[in-house]
Image (spheres, rainbow, N blue to C red):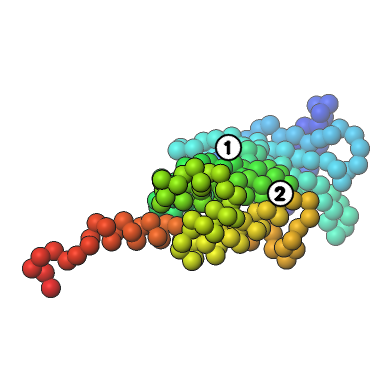
Amino acid sequence: MYDIQVITPLGDTVTARYTIQPDTCPVCKRACEVKAIGPKAIYPQHGDQAKKKLQLVHRCPRQACGSLFVVEYSARYDSASKVYFDVSAVYPRTPAPAEIPEGVAEISPKFVEILNQSLAAESHNLDQIVGIGLRKALEFLIKDYCITKFAEKADDVRSQMLGACIKNFVADQNIQSCAKRAAWLGNDETHYSRAWTAHDITDLKVLIGLTQNWIANEVLTAKYLAEMPEKPPGRT
Ligand SMILES: [Zn+2]
């Protein structure tokens, strides 16, 4: 625990106890020895101690970043019923970009864009719309993948429902199995009632990850088989 002098909305200086400093920059995501630099604020001026917040401005010490950010602490009570402040949020909330395997972004740049927007929504605790975004990202991934494979049937792919598209145009069993289940969970995110009560957004993210990985495996395998169809002549 540390004691710090902080300023109230009316300009008074009071002492607040708070827990650890963050050890990671929320902008560049690198571990670093973060230091609080002014200003240091506590708010609101009046009211319940338990609802007070402490905000400290920090700066990332890395020369390659150097961004300012705010660490917000919420009031807690210790075992002696004394108020202290513990980290509850860090602003800006900048999620790390989604990990996309090689080849997938070329097939569906929109999938990557929508997936990253969904993760941004998740980082802002917008939990009611994250699943809807993931469901949309899945549709773009599957339809763009199908159009890549069946360019002559692009209009059919675009017009069909996602489930039908997976069934009719995805031949690889691993991609089809994972995409089908991702679509089931994704549809749950858009409907009033859930069909899959034991599975949630975490499972949906895993299934979308599996789907994109199976697609990447297929695309990369096909690429190398096409580039290296046979051994060079004279080699054993
Ligand atoms: Zn940084």
Image point 49% across, 66% down: which residue? 173
Q: Measured from the top left, where is residue 76 in percent x and y? A: 82, 51
Would residue 112 be seen by someone viewing this image from the given angle?
no
Question: Closer to the camera, 73 or 101?
Answer: 101
| Few, some or many residues within 10 Å of mark 1 (<14, 14–19, 20+) | some
Q: Secondary structure at mark 1?
A: strand
Q: Measured from the top left, where is residue 195 in percent x and y? A: 74, 61
In the image, what residue type sits under mark 1?
Arg
Check disc 2 and report the residue beneath it.
Answer: 190
> Which numbered circle lies on residue 6?
none
Question: Closer to the camera, 99 or 75?
Answer: 99
The quadrant of the rendering that contains the C terminus is bottom left
Would residue 40 be seen by someone viewing this image from the given angle?
yes
Image point 67% across, 47% down: which residue? 132
| Name of the residue lying farthest toward the top | 10
Measured Cα–Cα span from mark 2 to mark 1: 40 Å
Image point 85% across, 60% down: which residue? 79
Q: Are marks 2 and 1 in contact (CB under 8 Å)?
A: no
Which of the 4 quarters of the picture holds residue 78?
Answer: bottom right
Q: Earlier in the sequence, mark 2 or mark 1?
A: 1
Check disc 1 and report the residue beneath it.
Answer: 59
Image point 68% across, 43% down: which residue? 124
Above or below for 55 versus 161: above
In the image, what residue type sits under mark 2?
Thr
| Name of the residue lying farthest toward the right | 47
Which of the 4 quarters of the picture holds residue 38?
Answer: top right
Above or below for 214 versus 88: below
Q: Is residue 214 left or right of residue 80?
A: left
Q: Is residue 235 left or right of residue 195?
A: left
| Name of the residue lying farthest toward the bottom | 236
